[in-house]
Amino acid sequence: MTNVRLQWDALVTIEEWRPEPSASRLKHELDGLAEVLHACVHAGASVSFILPFTLAEALDFWQARVLPSVLAGERRVLIAHSEEQIAGTVQLILGLPPNQQHRAEVAKLLVHPDVRRRGIGHALMERLETIAQSEGRTLLTLDTRTGDSAEPLYHSIGYQLAGVIPGYARGPASPDLEPTSFMYKHLLPLRST
């Protein structure tokens, strides 16, 4: 668990999501994660979903796609929260082919629209990189909608542009196909002492 004092002077805790066997606790976590995804898509985030996008669809994504992958050890999820409210999340996909065990994929960096531009995304990415290093990963890759608000964040923390594919994905609120930027960052391996 990492505590971070953010620009807005609120204490946000960043910790890895370890789904609890308690049904009520797991439901609370899944509902909070679904709320963040739902709010982000409705605020224009291009993260694989298009409008109309219901809270039930967001919940299904976490239950059917992410949770099994976390339980299988193929994905690690970080959650940023203040008290019981989830402010943001990011995923590290580790389940890659045998010839790519040196890398991991960053996915679904989501910060609730009500608390954006306060350092939460940056803090999540810092912690994610530490986890990647602890897993022996020396290369991180990601993709983001070209020109999206996350792109400058990734550049500011050392991600390099590998290239842009025009017409890669549909925008969340438009049938237009938009370009996607593919980025990468090399990490130093952790030294054992």
Image (cartoon, grey):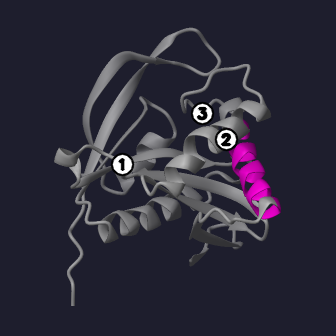
Q: Position of residue 17 (x, y in %)?
A: 59, 63
Amino acid under disc 1: Gly
Q: Which stretch is magenta?
A: 24-39
Q: Secondary structure at mark 3?
A: loop
The answer to whether the residues at label 3 and label 2 have Cβ atoms under 8 Å apart is no
How many angstroms separate mark 3 from mark 1 (CA)? 25 Å
Q: Is residue 34 magenta?
A: yes
Please give the label number shown on residue 45: 3
Which residue lies at the image location 26% right of the left edge and 52% below the top edge?
A: 103
Which residue lies at the image location 70% right of the left edge and 54% below the top edge?
A: 115
First-in-chain label (3 vs 1): 3
* In the depicted structure, whether residue 4 falls above or below residue 23: below
Which residue lies at the image location 59% right of the left edge and 69% below the top edge?
A: 14
* In the depicted structure, whether residue 32 falls above or below residue 178: below
Q: Residues within 10 Å of mark 1 (few under 14, many from 20)?
A: some
Amino acid under disc 2: Leu
Amino acid under disc 3: Ala
First-in-chain label (1 vs 2): 2
What residue is disc 2 on?
Answer: 37
Q: Residues within 10 Å of mark 2 (few under 14, many from 20)?
A: many
Q: Position of residue 9 (x, y in %)?
A: 69, 73
